[in-house]
Amino acid sequence: VQLQASGGGLVQAGGSLRLSCAASGFTLDDYTIGWFRQAPGKEREGVSCIHGGNGSPHYADSVKGRFTISGDNVKNTVYLQMNSLKPEDTAVYYCAASSSIQMNYYRKDGFGSWGQGTQVTVSS
């Protein structure tokens, strides 16, 4: 199981970014893929996840209505579309995989495979 996150960058408040998480060694249908973020001096927190099989998305309240998670089974890639970005969204973003197809996004201990992070910086 390998995950490769990309798509981070510097954007002004109100702008958008799309993160990608390319998966290899497994198929998305069999896993939950989650996005997490960690700001300096803070704990890593769950942002969103998409369940294997039915593809149902789940979001933390802090991003609901602004972020959209989606999966492309052909490319074996999960995306996180981030709109209306705020300075408090600044963090290193990580994608992770859980072998449970219905893992909750807030349970980072339930995700056993992690990609490297990608930096998202939102300027005010």
Image: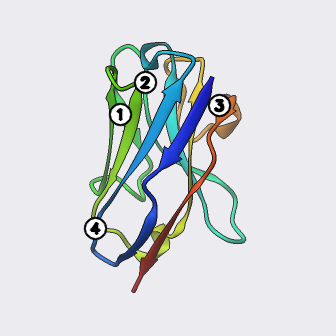
Q: Position of residue 47 (x, y in %)?
A: 49, 49
Looking at marks 4 and 3 on the same chain, the residue that comes earlier in the sequence is marked by 4
Q: Which amino acid type corresponds to the residue marked 1 in the rendered image?
A: Pro
Name the residue at 49% across, 13% down. Answer: 30
What is the distance, in whole Å, between disc 2 and disc 4 at their CAs? 24 Å
- At a point 29% along the width and 64% down the height, the residue shown is 16
Q: Is residue 68 above or below residue 27?
A: below
Element at label 4: loop
Q: Tell me the residue that label 4 is attached to.
A: 84
Give the position of the N terminus as an image quadrant: top right
What colouring method underlies this structural image?
rainbow
> Could you tell whether 10 is left or right of 113 in the image?
left
**CB-based contact (under 8 Å), mark 2 and mark 1:** yes
Indicate the position of residue 106 as horizontal and vertical percent values: 57, 41
Characterize the local packing of mark 1: few (<14), some (14-19) or many (20 or more) Cα atoms within 10 angstroms: some
Residue at image x 69%, y 28%? 112
- Horizontal and vertical percent for residue 38? 62, 60
Other-residue count near label 2 (Cα within 10 Å), few / some / many at <14 / 14–19 / ≥20: many
